Image: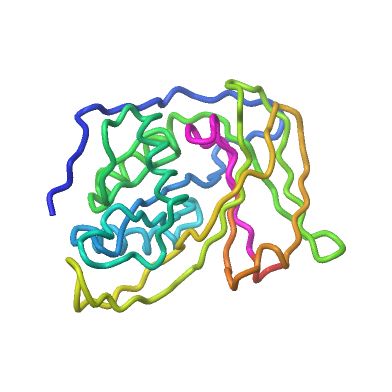
Amino acid sequence: MQRIRSVVFAFLGAALAVAAGSAVAGEKLPIVVELFTSQGCDSCPPADEFLAELTKRDDIIALAFHVNYWDYLGWKDTFASDATTQRQRTYATFLGERTVYTPQMVIGGVTHKVGSRRGDVNQVIDGLRQRAGPYLDVRVRRVEGGKIAVRIPAGELKQRDVVVWLVRYDSSDEVEIRRGENRGRTIVYRNIVSDYRELAMWYGDEIELELKVSELREGGHDGSVILVQEGGSGRIIGAAKVDLDAI
């Protein structure tokens, strides 16, 4: 399958300056890597494997958003939804893309690469570490009543409409693909996003949000992530995993 890509490339790598609560110099707070993939895309499995490797890194939050626009080729992606597909389309607008493609990795919310090109992706990750500047140190802890508290520190607001997202995912699932471009293959997918929703807006002041652990586990999902993102689909300025096993 030929993937159509836009020749427009947007990289907005200017530093974000934040005040109290930003990362200590040298501390590796996580960079978010989002893979847009499909079970019906024959060029996606190498990117799926790469994402699986990234999930093992402590300095990366790796998430797989499955898209549904290849379903017409004969296999309906069992993880895809309109919502996960729309996230990629919203990124395309922010990044100046004329269209969407798979496999695409969006890194830090500010740039993208073909998801199977490991060297290119790792180069961007390393570059963001050097240039991204201070970063909101989002903290998660358990509190009474079967809840967790998410603390987002105060910082300098560089852009309006900063969204705090809750992203829920399944850490692993195996799919036997019987039709389409990957027919006959059994593929193990990692950190499969099932849903995401807005928790709050961040206006530069410290805030603390409480979530029920039962709500995070609803539907059998075993992973959650908090993202703090400019414009809802721009630069990610803070992120934290919610370790459900530890709480």
At 39% across and 43% down in the image, what residue appears?
A: 88
Q: Nearer the viewer, residue 219 or 186?
A: 219
Q: Position of residue 237 (x, y in %)?
A: 56, 35
Residue positioned most to the right: 144
Q: Measuring from the top left, give residue 1's x and y in whole percent.
A: 13, 54
Q: Residue at x 70, y 27 (%)?
A: 203
Residue at position x 56%, y 53% in the image: 167
Q: Is residue 158 above or below residue 34?
A: above
The answer to whether 122 appears left or right of 94 in the picture is: left
Is 56 located above or below residue 164 in the figure? below
Does residue 173 show up magenta in the picture? no
Give the residue at the far front of this rendering: 72
At horizontal 58% and vertical 34% (from top left) the residue drawn is 135
- Tell me which corner region of the image, top left, top right, bottom left or bottom right, holds residue 159: top right
Name the residue furthest left.
Answer: 2
Picture quadrant of residue 160: top right
Highlighted range, magenta: 227-243
- Toward which corner of the image does residue 204 lie, by quadrant? top right
